[in-house]
Amino acid sequence: MRAMLTTTVVVLGLALASSAVCAAGKPVKKSSAKPSAVSRAAAPAAAAPVVLSPEQLSIAQIVYTGAIPCAEGKTVNIAPDANTQGMFTMQFAGSRQTLTPIPTQSGAVRLENKGSGMVFMQLANKSMLFNERQGKRLADECHSSEQQAVADRLNANGGAAFGQ
């Protein structure tokens, strides 16, 4: 048994030594540089597929999409995500975010990216874009054509609810 172990160690040693010689017969120089923090870091785990609840999928059906003009000449672009049903891609000020529908008690449409803190709220008459991490409203008075029609009716009625 001991002879077998010794033979295995010798064979492994020779295999390692021969692997350090390139095809030209010259030894391969080992780099003396230390590995970078990036190479030492563990590779990130593959993201698990996103599975939305039936409630989230229901919310996704009523999201206003397209180029939505806002106050101060800003525009928020909302489009269905090409990879995941019920998710949305938002483009704003050179940034691209993937947003998830989040149920609310009020019934307002809330799309958010928990990683970045971006939240896009859609009401019947307007939408707003926030960065919750920064505590800032980035865009206000955003109106899709449907929202603009509701806002116009509200303004015509002095802000009163319809039919009152």
Image (spheres, rainbow, N blue to C red):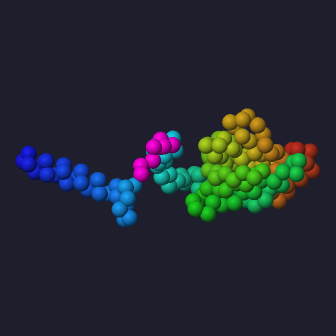
Residue at 67% of width from left, 48% of height from top? Answer: 111
Read off the magenta span: 29-36
Q: Main secondary structure of the magenta part?
A: loop
User: In the current view of this chain or complex, which residue is farthest to the bottom?
Assistant: 23
Task: Measuring from the top left, give residue 17's x and y in whole percent.
Answer: 29, 53
Total number of numbered discs in the rendering: 0
Could you tell whether 149 is left or right of 87 in the image? Answer: right
Task: Measuring from the top left, give residue 148's x and y in whole percent.
Answer: 85, 55
34 falls in the magenta region? yes
Task: Measuring from the top left, give residue 32's x and y in whole percent.
Answer: 45, 43
Residue at 59% of width from left, 52% of height from top? Answer: 56
User: In the current view of this chain or complex, which residue is farthest to the top?
Assistant: 135
Question: 147 or 6, which lies in front?
Answer: 6
Could you tell whether 132 is left or right of 157 in the image? Answer: left
Task: Measuring from the top left, give residue 76's x and y in whole percent.
Answer: 77, 53
Could you tell whether 61 is left or right of 73 in the image? Answer: left
163 falls in the magenta region? no
Question: 1 or 123, which lies in front?
Answer: 1
Q: Quadrant of residue 61?
A: bottom right
Question: 164 or 108, which lies in front?
Answer: 108
Residue at 35% of width from left, 62% of height from top? Answer: 25
Q: Is residue 108 visible?
A: no
Residue at 26% of width from left, 56% of height from top? Answer: 15
Q: Is residue 45 visible?
A: yes
